[in-house]
Image (tube, helix red, strand yellow):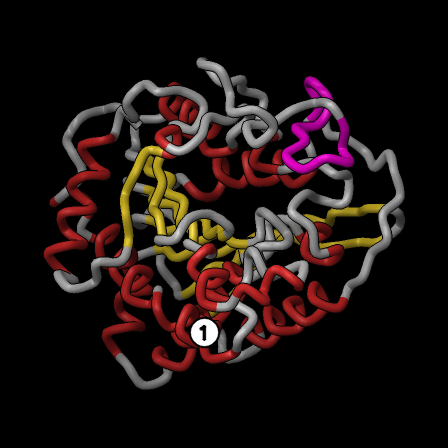
Amino acid sequence: MISQPTQKSKVSNNLYTAYEAAIMRLLSSGGLCHSVAEQSIEVYDVNYTMRLIAVGEAPPDAPTLVIIAGVHGIESIGVDILLNYLSALTVQSGWSDSVRSLLQRVRLLAIPMANPSGIAIRRRANANGVDLMRNAPVDARVKATWMVGGHRYSRCLPWFRGRPGVLEQETQVLFDWCNSLFCRGPCTLVLDIHSGFGLRDQIWYPYAGQKTAFPRIGDVLALERLFDASYPHHHHYQFSQQSQYYITHGDLWDWIYDHRFTHANQPFLPLTLELGSWLWLKKNPKQLLNKLGLFHPMVEHRRSRVLRQHFSLLDFLIKAVEVWPTWIEPGTHA
């Protein structure tokens, strides 16, 4: 059951409109990027669009990398990183045969705005006040972290899970696209970009709602070793199970992973890139005076650094998913 808006929000489309214009430029810039699926999200007679974009001409049964941004509307730096990367690939494909060839062998999918109404009103939750990363129909198996782990007290408070048994439109779309469009190939790797936690960039893997070891922990460690060997001086990302930091109800990737584990044999590895935004505050405490300051680098040179800082990771993931049999453990578990 999908929820309908129950309280009116003041909507400002400025940021959403800017991102939508950037997406449309990519879609009309020569054929590298094209829309695979679109879903209208209507809130108080305002229509927003969630788009699933394919980059290149790889067939649906190719190994797949999915990059997602904007699940939390206020964490807009993830959208900037993703759109900047897609723009760079578009330019590179114009002069590099190797880039064009790679994108014919690896299916790259992107969802630049997974929470378009939240981006429009510049808040973590969607326009219904629901945190999409707490909205999935799964409860933590151990005691969840108070408030941060999700609650049902009030949509006026952050981390609101929504009403019991009610899925937000965006949550349902992500679940449906994962099952119908993401996982057609022999291996699917997902990177969901967030910000707002810690002094160091984290790469988190399930589970968020339990302390049980992630069934594909061997694959995560193999991927980490491969990355460290390929970029030995990065000293940048820390790979961790999310529940090491806090326990949450309703985690989207816990839910989707467990569904894939039960219903599919193809390897499916969802990762979350959590940008260490506290470092930006440490360097520039004045950011706390801005609503976006906890989640977005407000100084332009620092924003530029963040935009280029993650290119190596994204390039690595595309190449790694192409050669997935060399590091994915054999077996039939998803």
Q: Position of residue 176 (x, y in %)?
A: 56, 35
Q: Is residue 59 visible?
A: no
- Residue under the point 33% across and 33% down: 241
Three-letter code for the amino acid on which mark 1 is drawn: Arg
Q: Nearer the viewer, residue 61 or 3?
A: 3
**Observer-nearest of 324 and 139:** 139
Q: Is residue 323 above or below residue 26?
A: above
Is any part of residue 252 visible from this angle? Answer: yes
Quadrant that contains the C terminus: top left
Residue stretch rendered in magenta on the structure:
154-166
Magenta-span inclusion, residue 186: no
* Residue indicated by mark 1: 302
Residue 242's image quarter? top left
Q: Magenta stretch: residue 159 in it?
A: yes
Q: Nearer the viewer, residue 246 or 29?
A: 246
* Crowd around label 1: few <14 · some 14–19 · many ≥20 (10 Å): few
Task: Name the residue at 80% across, 61% down.
Answer: 12
* Residue 300 image position (x, y, % from top left): 52, 78
Element type at marker 1? helix
Residue 171 x %, y %:
61, 36
Image-based side of 303 in relation to 314, left or right: right
